[in-house]
Amino acid sequence: MGHHLELADRLARQLFRLIKTLERTKAQAAAARGEKLERACFGLLIELADRGPRRMTALADAVLTDPSTVSRQVAQLVDLGYVERQPDPDDGRASRLAATELGLAHLAQGRDRRNRMIDAVLADWTTEDREHLVRLIERFNDDFETHRPLMLAVEPARTRQETA
């Protein structure tokens, strides 16, 4: 394995470790708070809060999830009062989904908890190191998003060739 591939493997392992630790921590913290909202619903609420009301299909596309999953998650958000259905001004037969004031407040509380947790984790880091980490993660995310369509188009063909 070449040096770049070894570094890629180390990074992948650390990303996996980070994602698993975040998922476990969020689930345990939510259970301790008695939270009823499914963690996956947060992405939908964030999308609506950040980019405004939209139709269900556009929301599913934005969060890279299938419409049936989004429909179930939206139902939970509506039941909790975090999202509401509004008439679509462009099509009276359709509706749009929008974050409510209660949903925005819930999201703000979650962001505050998350930011305080990250700040505590980085308490011993210099401002320069924190800024450097943010720049590198932003660059990685931008590059990953840029390469994502190519990876989706290339990987299945390579997998088929490798198994033939």
Image (spheres, helix red, strand yellow):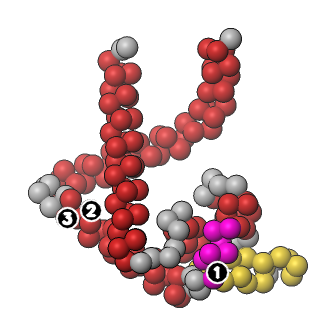
Residue highlighted by disc 3:
120
Secondary structure at badge 1 equals helix
Report if the CB atoms under discs 2 and 3 are less than 8 Å apart. Answer: yes
Marking on residue 78? 1
Position in image of residue 140 (x %, y %): 41, 42
**Tag 1: residue type?**
Val
For the stretch drawn in magenta, the main secondary structure is helix
Quadrant of the frame with the C terminus: top right
Local crowd size for mark 1, using a 10 Å CA cut-off: few (<14), some (14–19), many (≥20): some
Any magenta on residue 1? no
Q: Is residue 134 left or right of residue 163?
A: left
Quadrant of the frame with the N terminus: top left
Residue highlighted by disc 2:
118
Secondary structure at badge 3 equals helix
**Residue furthest bottom in the image:** 101
Marking on residue 11? none
Secondary structure at badge 2 equals helix
**Tag 3: residue type?**
Ala
Give the CA distance from mark 1 to mark 2.
Answer: 29 Å
Position in image of residue 74 (x %, y %): 65, 72
**Tag 2: residue type?**
Ile
Point out the frontmost of discs 1 and 3.
Answer: 1
- Quarter where residue 155 is shown: top right
Give the CA distance from mark 1 to mark 3.
Answer: 33 Å
Q: Identify whether 41 is placed above or below 134.
A: below
Local crowd size for mark 2, using a 10 Å CA cut-off: few (<14), some (14–19), many (≥20): few
Could you tell me which residue is drawn at 88 percent across and 79 percent down?
93
Could you tell me which residue is drawn at 30 percent across and 68 percent down?
115
